[in-house]
């Protein structure tokens, strides 16, 4: 189950909608009630510190993901409409933490011509896929991740022409 932690002074009015869209993504990915993934919504300073401390990159970014367990995933037709989902598991999974920089999301939404709610949900979806082991370091991995994101966007009603930087 996703838990949300709003670490910004003034959470946006669309807070519930943002949480709801990511909950739909989580459900489509097969995250069970007893599984655990946390979403921390923070600002530039916190994400820059995390980026510097854990990635050795002294810059702000939109999302960082810190996976814990290494879940097995099912891809393709067997994964249903999402094209990706967690494999059946008996024991609860500790998936990890996603940190979303709300200020960067707001800037990107404006630059990309997207509603903030949908930019947030797109960036959050990206982070959740990182918790499941997806990466975009190589072209084939990036394409696979983007294809999964697009399917999840349709399921959750996330409307972005592009997102991120």
Image (cartoon, helix red, strand yellow):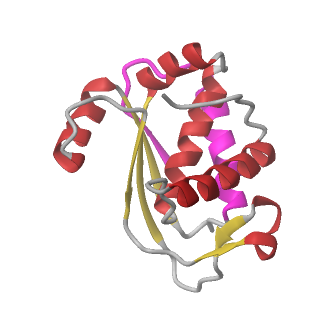
Q: Quadrant of the N terminus?
A: bottom right
Examine the rendering and report whether any part of residue 115 can be seen. Answer: yes
Q: Is residue 160 left or right of residue 47?
A: right
Compared to residue 89, the image places residue 30 above or below, namely above
Residue 163 position, x and y percent, is: 59, 31
Q: Is residue 161 left or right of residue 22?
A: right
Query: Which residue is found at the position 66% from the left and 20% from the top?
Result: 114
Q: How many marks?
A: 0
Residue 37 position, x and y percent, is: 48, 58
Query: Which residue is found at the position 22% from the left and 39% from the top?
Result: 57
Q: Please tell me which residue lies in front, 78 or 6.
A: 78
Compared to residue 120, the image places residue 152 above or below, namely below
In the image, the segment drawn in magenta is 1-29
Compared to residue 145, the image places residue 17 above or below, namely above
Residue 15 position, x and y percent, is: 58, 28
Residue 56 position, x and y percent, is: 18, 44
Compared to residue 63, the image places residue 148 above or below, namely below
Residue 100 lies in quadrant: top left
Residue 90 belongs to magenta span: no
Query: Which residue is found at the position 79% from the left and 76% from the top?
Result: 78
Query: Which residue is found at the position 67% from the left and 68% from the top?
Result: 85
Residue 20 belongs to magenta span: yes
Q: Please tell me which residue lies in front, 27 or 16.
A: 27
Q: Please tell me which residue lies in front, 149 or 143.
A: 143
Examine the rendering and report whether any part of residue 2 can be seen. Answer: no
């Amino acid at each position: 189950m996703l838990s949300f932690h709003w670490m910004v002074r003034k959470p946006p009015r669309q807070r519930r909608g943002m949480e709801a869209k990511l909950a739909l993504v989580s459900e489509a990915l097969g995250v069970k009630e007893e599984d655990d993934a946390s979403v921390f919504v923070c600002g530039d300073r916190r994400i820059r510190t995390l980026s510097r401390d854990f990635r050795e990159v002294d810059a702000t970014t939109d999302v960082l993901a810190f996976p814990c367990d290494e879940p097995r995933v099912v891809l393709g037709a067997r994964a249903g409409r999402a094209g990706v989902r967690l494999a059946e598991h008996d024991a609860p999974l500790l998936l990890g933490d996603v940190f979303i920089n709300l200020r960067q999301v707001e800037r990107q939404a404006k630059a990309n011509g997207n509603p903030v709610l949908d930019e947030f949900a797109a960036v959050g979806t990206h982070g959740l896929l990182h918790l499941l082991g997806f990466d975009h370091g190589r072209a084939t991995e990036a394409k696979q991740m983007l294809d999964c994101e697009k399917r999840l966007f349709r399921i959750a009603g996330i409307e972005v022409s592009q997102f991120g930087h």
